Amino acid sequence: MSCVWNKYRSKFVCIV
């Protein structure tokens, strides 16, 4: 699982 910062929604998004 890797998490990246979503600068458009100002939150972290994790993808399995």
Image: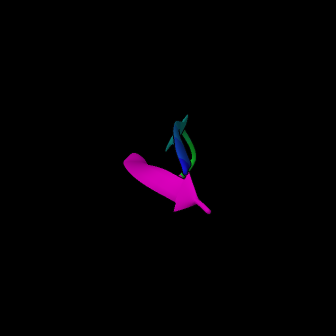
Q: Is residue 12 left or right of residue 7?
A: left
Residue 6: x percent and y percent? 54, 44
Residue 15: x percent and y percent? 62, 59
* Residue 11 on the magenta segment: yes
Q: Residue furthest bottom?
A: 16
5 w.r.t. 8: above or below: above
Please report the residue visible at 51 percent of the width from the left and 56 percent of the height from the top. 14
Please report the residue visible at 37 percent of the width from the left and 50 percent of the height from the top. 11
Q: Nearer the viewer, residue 1 or 9?
A: 1
Name the quadrant of the C terminus: bottom right
Residue 4: x percent and y percent? 54, 38
Query: Magenta part mainly helix, strand or loop?
Result: strand
**Count of marks overlaid on the render:** 0
Q: What's the colour scheme?
A: rainbow
Please report the residue visible at 50 percent of the width from the left and 55 percent of the height from the top. 13
Q: Nearer the viewer, residue 8 or 3?
A: 3
Q: Nearer the viewer, residue 5 or 2?
A: 2
Q: Nearer the viewer, residue 10 or 13?
A: 13
Residue 12: x percent and y percent? 41, 48
Please report the residue visible at 55 percent of the width from the left and 51 percent of the height from the top. 1
Q: Is residue 3 left or right of residue 11?
A: right
* Residue 10 on the magenta segment: yes
Residue stretch rendered in magenta on the structure: 9-16
